[in-house]
Structure formats: C-alpha cells, structure tokens
Image: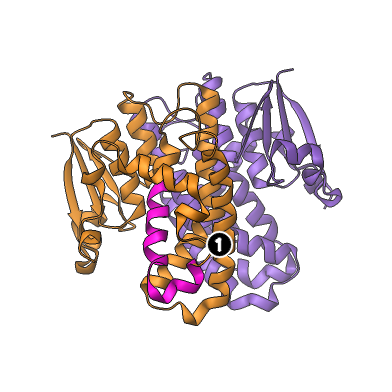
Chain colours: A purple, B orange
Amino acid sequence: MALTLYWGSGSPFSWRVQLALEHKGLEYESQLLHFDKQEHQSPQMLKLNPRGRVPVLKDGDYVVFESVAILYFLDLKYPQQPIFGSSPEEAGVIMRVICEFQAYAEPSLIKITSAVFAGKVADGIEELTDAMHVVAREARTIEGRLSKEPWIVGTGYSATDMVIFPWIQLLRRALDRPAAAELGARFLPMERNYPALARWIGRIEALPGYERTYPPHWRHT
Amino acid sequence: MALTLYWGSGSPFSWRVQLALEHKGLEYESQLLHFDKQEHQSPQMLKLNPRGRVPVLKDGDYVVFESVAILYFLDLKYPQQPIFGSSPEEAGVIMRVICEFQAYAEPSLIKITSAVFAGKVADGIEELTDAMHVVAREARTIEGRLSKEPWIVGTGYSATDMVIFPWIQLLRRALDRPAAAELGARFLPMERNYPALARWIGRIEALPGYERTYPPHWRHT
C-alpha cells in the first residue's frame, strides 16, 4: 500500500485527512499513534516531522504534514472526487474560508477545548467566555451559509467542510462536559441554536466511510 | 483592466500578493487604501470583505481575500510562472512550509511588531522576549534551508518565499527602532546572524518589479 497516515484519536487535524481519504476512496495504511504514550514524538516520527505533530502522510517515500497541506497534496495527486472545487474561482473561495476559519475561529477553539479537557474552565472563565463569543460569531456566519446550501462552500462537500467539521465535533464534546455547562449554554443543543449546522453534521455523519474516521476513544468515553 | 488589488502600505499580507502579481507579470489596478483614514473599513470595502481587511483581489466580478487564498487563486487562474511548484509533491511542501509559518511564527511576529509600532515594548518585555525566541528558532530553520538552496522550498521562487519575505522585512523594520534594541540584539544585523536569510532578502529585492511592491510610506519614515 502506497499511502500511510500517522494520526491521533480525537485530533481534529488528523480527522480532516481521514475524511478526505475516505471521500476520495483511497486505501491507506492507518497508523494510530497514542498521545498518552508519546508515540507522536518517537524518534521515528520526529524523523518524519521534526515538530512531532500529527497528522503525517507518507506516499511512498514522500512525506507531508500540516493538515491543510496534506489535503492540498492529496487533491493534486489524486484528483478524483475533487475537494478544492472545479474552477479557480471555487478553489479560491474554498481556500479563503479555510484561511478565515484558521485565522478567526481556530485560536478560540483551541483555547476552549484545551481548557475543558484539562479541567481548567473555572481558572479562565472570562477569557473562555470571550473565546465562546468569537466562536459563536463565526458559527453564526457558517450557519448563514448552510441555511442556503448543503455544504459550506459551493455545491459539493469540500476541503472547507473537512477542515471545519472535526472542530465542531470536538467543541460539542467539550461543551457537553458538566464543567462547561455555562460556556455551552447558548451553543448547545445545536439543533436549536444552529439548526443548519446540526443538519450539516448529520449529512457528514451519513457519508460512506464516516464510521472509520470516528475517533476510536470517543466511543468509550 | 480585469484585476484590481485593494491593499495597504506595510501590510505584510498585501505585500505577498503584490510580489505574486509582479512575478507573474500580471497587470492590475492598484487601489492603495489608507489605514489611518479607515479606508479599508469603508462601506464599499466591507461589501467586498465583511471583515474589513486587506488584501482583497477583484478579478472581473469575482472577489477573493485572505492572502494565501489569493495566491492560490492566482496560480490556478494564471498558471504562467507557477508559484506552487510543478508537481503535487513540490506543491505539498510549499503549502506545508506556509502552514508551518502561519501556525508557529506568525502569532509571535504579530505580537512583536504590533507592540513595537504601538510604542509598547516595555509593557510586555517578558512576553516579547519569549516571542523573539520563537521567531529566532523558526528563522534558524529557514536559515538552514537557505544555506543550501537559493529559495526556501524547491528550486524556484515560490509562494513560500512570498508569504515569509514581507514578515521578515516588517520584523527588521520593527527591530531597528531604538525601543526594540534589546529585543533585536541577537537578530540584527541579519548579515551576521542570519547570513543566508540576508542574501535571500537581497535576491528578492533584486527581482524585476520589486520596487513597485515596496511599501510607499516606508520610503519616508
């Protein structure tokens, strides 16, 4: 098998690539690394990515990391089922919304989910509340898009959906924790507060191969 | 003229796009917006980009913003003088190094340059010193690449160079201020501390059309 993906369970960055590989129907060798055993920082992994981060994709002898770069490489190398649209104009919007998400939503999402999973919500509640306002504003924009179209950009499932979806799932999981009840009060349940986003989540969950991408440790905890 | 670029003098994000347009030899209408007059937040500009940020590129009726998305669009629409390489593998590395720069260097660069130009170095000297350590580490990695090859990725001038160069120029300008002397002590002069980076800067400065991209207000102050 030519493709090998090194990934971590629950890593939103890894999940993006898994969604792309399934969508393109590409077979790949799955190398699940255990964060708790520091497997992503093993000498072997540091040789592939000196930053010791996942996901890392190997294609034969070629190595690429950083999730958006992996999506971009995959789409150029395996153009079936394109994920960056079918024209320069559509590709530009797909990449633009990805860049916006990374610049304006991701820092707040990292702040919130890190604090919740580290059990440190109370310590930084003011900063986290501000971060939730940012996230809610960005989610409102995406809600607006999804209330008109089934996918975030254009007419098909694209890299934009793949980049954003895992973060929404991770955020929901974080806000479901009792300690995050106050933070999540205006976000959850999504069916009420963000109905178009909730339907979009259902749409992705129903895609073929989705179950294979679901973080294995989330099934038990 | 089909292409119009809305940009701001000294905006590293704008500068990237100007470098790409010059490299590709594309004619464009240049719309310089004055930040001090809030021209980037005018009703007309907010219609193009609701975030009120530059650069914004118009190509006929099509509008795209976020600098990396603009570079990506330009390369798909105007493939002459490619800036994302000539193979999926090369493209993947170009995008990977851009993503790494955005994730690991840019937040610290924003912190340092904002503080210096706002005259607030003393207030946050500890945090800024940490940020300089991060920047120095990332610069060291790029120095390593440039000590072997004339361009950061692959054999040609690419989007990676265009993304990183304006930030290095802005950083040098910031660290040249007397208030930043301590922060910049181990960075400047670049000729001594980062000789390969300094030569790379000279190489870009010598490119045809470079002078047209130079921030106009930097000539006087």
Front residue of this view, candidates A175 and A51: A51
Circle 1 packing at 10 Å, graded few (<14), some (14-19), many (20+), is many
Question: Picture coordinates of residue B40 (x, y %)?
Answer: 24, 59
In the image, the segment drawn in magenta is B165-184
Q: Give the residue furthest to the left.
A: B1
- The amino acid pointed to by label 1 is Ser
- Report the front residue among A6 and B98: B98
Residue at 42%, 31% in the rendered image: A155
Q: Residue at x 36, y 51 (%)?
A: B13
**Label 1 SS:** helix
Which residue in the structure is indicated by mark 1?
A108
- What is the number of callouts on the image? 1
> Seen in the image, is B164 located left or right of residue A178?
left
Quarter of the figure that contains the N terminus of chain A: top right
Residue B216 seen anywhere in this rendered image of the structure: yes
Is residue B102 part of the magenta span, yes or no?
no
Q: Residue at x 40, y 24 (%)?
A: A86
- Quick one: B140 or A109, which is closer to the camera? B140
Q: Main secondary structure of the magenta part?
A: helix
Instruction: Provide residue A176's location: percent of width, then percent of height.
Output: 70, 61
B76 in relation to B30, above or below: above
In the depicted view, which residue is nearer to us: B150 or B51?
A: B150
